[in-house]
Image (spheres, rainbow, N blue to C red):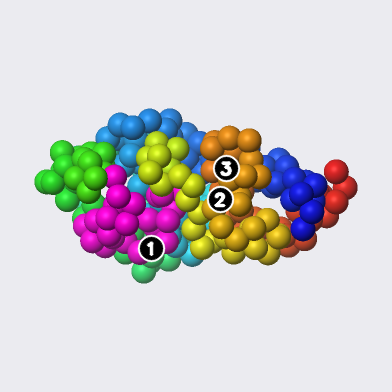
């Protein structure tokens, strides 16, 4: 695909779906602080379910309203209450139960091993992305998809991850002819922030009925 065509598609994606990253939509102020990192992790785990990105963001904001977005407050809550809150927002019972167990395990292990700070985990493995992934999956019992979502959002803080793109992003990018690796996508944007916004736009378009066709159509009209 010609560069001008890719530029039009990127501009359209950012305009329609990428004005904010998912973390920004969830009103998470991205900073390398314990509560913030755990909130990004929570959002990532909430995205690993059969719900839209908007539903996951809404679920996170509901948890925050109840003060369940720090490790200590989440551990003080009952799993039943958190599960009920998620199912009330449209999560299937099996997804809600799995997510709550994962978040509770993560909070417990973070408190016990790293003083509630994911930054401590990062330091313990020498900022090695493969070991960061392995440790997150082991202590939180989450799937690759959840770690992918966490890496996608946190790469602006954890520079060793840049440029990172997961299977969901690359599948959508491939369907639109934007490239098949993170470096190619990064070259299509003017900043690392826009790179992450583009990635999240590609995640969102997957959930929009007829989204690919509408993006191609709008890009052709530019």
Q: Can residue 138 be seen in this view?
A: yes
**Residue 211 drawn at (x, y percent):** 71, 58
Q: Which residue in the protein does label 2 denote? A: 183
What secondary structure is the magenta-colored segment mainly?
helix
Q: Which of 142 and 219 is in front in this view?
A: 219
Q: Which residue is at a point 23% across and 61% down the rendered structure image?
A: 138
Instruction: Examine the structure image and report whether residue 92 is included in the region drawn in magenta.
Output: no
Disc 1 residue crowd, few under 14, some 14–19, many 20+, Cα 10 Å: some
Residues tagged 2 and 1 counted as in contact (Cβ below 8 A): no
Q: Residue placed farthest to the left in the image?
A: 112
Judged from the image, the secondary structure of the residue bearing numbered disc 2 is: helix
Where is residue 119, by image quadrant? Answer: top left
Can you tell which of label 2 and label 3 is closer to the viewer? 2
Q: Which residue in the protein does label 3 denote? A: 195
**Residue 28 drawn at (x, y percent):** 43, 34
Q: Which residue is at a point 45% across and 45% down the rendered structure image?
A: 162
Q: Which residue in the protein does label 1 denote? A: 144
Disc 2 residue crowd, few under 14, some 14–19, many 20+, Cα 10 Å: some
Q: As displayed, is residue 152 above or below residue 174?
A: above
The magenta span reads 127-152
Q: As displayed, is residue 110 above or below residue 49?
A: above
Instruction: Examine the structure image and report whether residue 130 is included in the region drawn in magenta.
Output: yes
């Amino acid at each position: 695909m010609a560069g001008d065509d890719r530029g039009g598609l990127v501009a359209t994606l950012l305009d329609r779906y990428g004005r904010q990253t998912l973390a920004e939509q969830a009103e998470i102020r991205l900073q390398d602080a314990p509560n913030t990192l755990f909130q990004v992790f929570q959002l990532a785990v909430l995205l690993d379910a059969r719900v839209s990105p908007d539903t996951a963001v809404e679920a996170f904001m509901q948890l925050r309203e109840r003060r369940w977005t720090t490790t200590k407050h989440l551990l003080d809550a009952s799993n039943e209450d958190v599960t009920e809150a998620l199912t009330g927002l449209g999560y299937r019972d099996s997804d809600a139960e799995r997510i709550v167990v994962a978040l509770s395990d993560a909070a417990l292990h973070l408190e016990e091993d790293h003083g509630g700070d994911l930054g401590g985990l990062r330091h313990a493995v020498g900022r090695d992305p493969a070991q960061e992934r392995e440790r997150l999956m082991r202590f939180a019992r989450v799937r690759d998809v959840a770690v992918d979502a966490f890496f996608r959002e946190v790469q602006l803080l954890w520079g060793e991850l840049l440029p990172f793109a997961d299977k969901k992003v690359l599948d959508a990018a491939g369907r639109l002819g934007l490239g098949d690796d993170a470096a190619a996508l990064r070259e299509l944007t003017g900043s690392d922030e826009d790179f992450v916004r583009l990635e999240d736009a590609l995640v969102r378009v997957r959930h929009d009925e007829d989204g690919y066709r509408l993006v191609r159509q709008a890009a052709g009209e530019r």
